[in-house]
Amino acid sequence: MKASAKFDIIVYGATGFTGQLVAEYLSTRYRGDNELKWAMAGRSLDKLASVRDTIGAAAETPLIVADASDPASLQAMIDQTKVIISTVGPYQLYGSELVAACAGSGTDYIDLCGEPVWMRQMIDRHEAAAKASGARIVFSCGFDSVPFELGAFYVQEEAKRVFGAPAARVKGRVRAMRGTLSGGTAASAKATFDAVAKDLSLVAILNDPFALTPGFSGAKQPRGNKPAYEEDLQSWAAPFMMALINTRNVHRSNMLMGFPYGSEFVYDEMVLTGPGEKGEANARKVMAANTEKTGPNAPKPGEGPSKEERENGLYDLLYVAIGPDSRQVRASVKGDRDPGYGSTSKMIAECAICLLRDAPDVPAGFWTPGAAMQHKLIKRLADHAGLTFAVER
């Protein structure tokens, strides 16, 4: 991490829907924190000023013009800060230059990316440069995949306490979720499918559970692509559309931490839909809805729910660690806002603060937030971002 810079954090993309929420969170939560120096960046100075006034940020909040299509403006921006928060996606369309510039110049970088093919490409191209410059590049610092990655970590800590060793099998299950998919997530999914259609060699990366663990492939993983009844949970389970990115990040996290879950670790994610015929019918509805969420009626980037909808949102995630004798340890992660916007904007902001203040000694390179910050991030999210981590008896 750069020792000295004009700013601690720059929110790049602050005029977008999610970027505005991140800026609003920093402006509100850290209003009295004179130690935190942050700025807002985007393509239009007028729009940035309008957002600054709309969210009630201080009139002296610095505004920086930067554009993904202008590498010089990106370099000028990152030269001024220790950490960049990028909300400008789809990242495979607008993020490559910024990652390359951060990796090359020792600037820490944090984003909301859920695009595994692009992430693998960035790791392959720029990890050596990041390690040489001192940059920490941290992808997936929103709903994909912070609660899932930390949920697996948290239940494994309890498994070690109860079983005396981590579990070789963990299930991640969505018990409840209220809130809309973000327009950025839908756009990222579409961009990924478009890229794969143009280059079929990318299909192998997309389908590989170990796409984000270069040089390592572990045990065969459940496909999670159709409804199934789970006897131990007494519930039907349906495919979860975000499992495609979350499972990859959990396996990468395991690798980055030195395989504390073991090299044969098995992890999957599904949505619990209840018992009986109703549960089965609901599982099939969830499967059908997954297709609609990335279809022509999906939300557009820049669109999002109202403040009331964000505040009325929630999520409840269950983690089940299964021991060698079939004993189970269970834990939950819950969020107090809608996942795609209200909770995500708080999580990415706190990831940046955590990296800056609580985890300055994390080595350079490409990281997952959970592997980089572990217990420190759990504490910060519980203290500030409305997440609850609990062991279930």
Image (cartoon, rainbow, N blue to C red):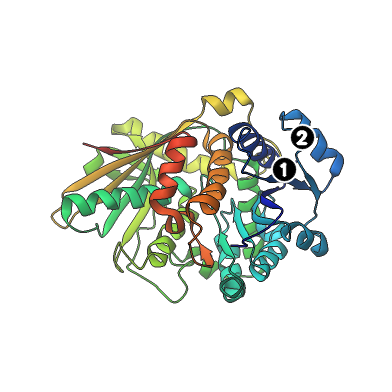
Residue at 19% across / 54% down in the picture?
323
In the depicted view, which residue is nearer to us: 34 or 256? 34
Q: Position of residue 195 (x, y in %)?
A: 66, 63
Q: Residues within 10 Å of mark 1 (few under 14, many from 20)?
A: many
Under circle 1, the secondary element is loop
Which residue carries the number 1 mark?
14
The residue most toward the right is 46
Instruction: Identify the residue at horizontal 53%, vertical 43% (top origin).
Output: 347
Task: Give the residue drawn at x 69%, y 41%.
Answer: 300
The amino acid type of the residue labelled 2 equals Val
Using a 10 Å C-alpha cutoff, classify the residue at mark 2 as few (fewer than 14 neighbours), some (14 to 19) or many (20 or more). many
Q: In this orientation, which residue lies closer to the viewer: 8 or 390? A: 8
**Quarter containing the N terminus:** bottom right
Element class at badge 2: helix
Q: Which circle marks residue 51 in the picture?
A: 2
Residue 382 or residue 252, whichever sits in front: 382
Image height check: is 140 above or below 72?
above
In the rendered image, the vertical position of residue 277 relative to residue 212, given as above or below: above
Residue 143 is left or right of residue 229, and the answer is: right
Residue 340 is labelled as none
Q: Are marks 1 and 2 in contact (CB under 8 Å)?
A: yes
Q: Nearer the viewer, residue 162 or 64?
A: 64
**Residue at coordinates 44% horizontally, 54% vertically from top-left?**
373
Residue 341 percent coordinates (x, y) = 59, 37
Task: Report the residue that reaches farthest toward the top.
Answer: 308
**Res. 41 in view:** yes
Q: Is residue 375 above or below residue 204?
A: above
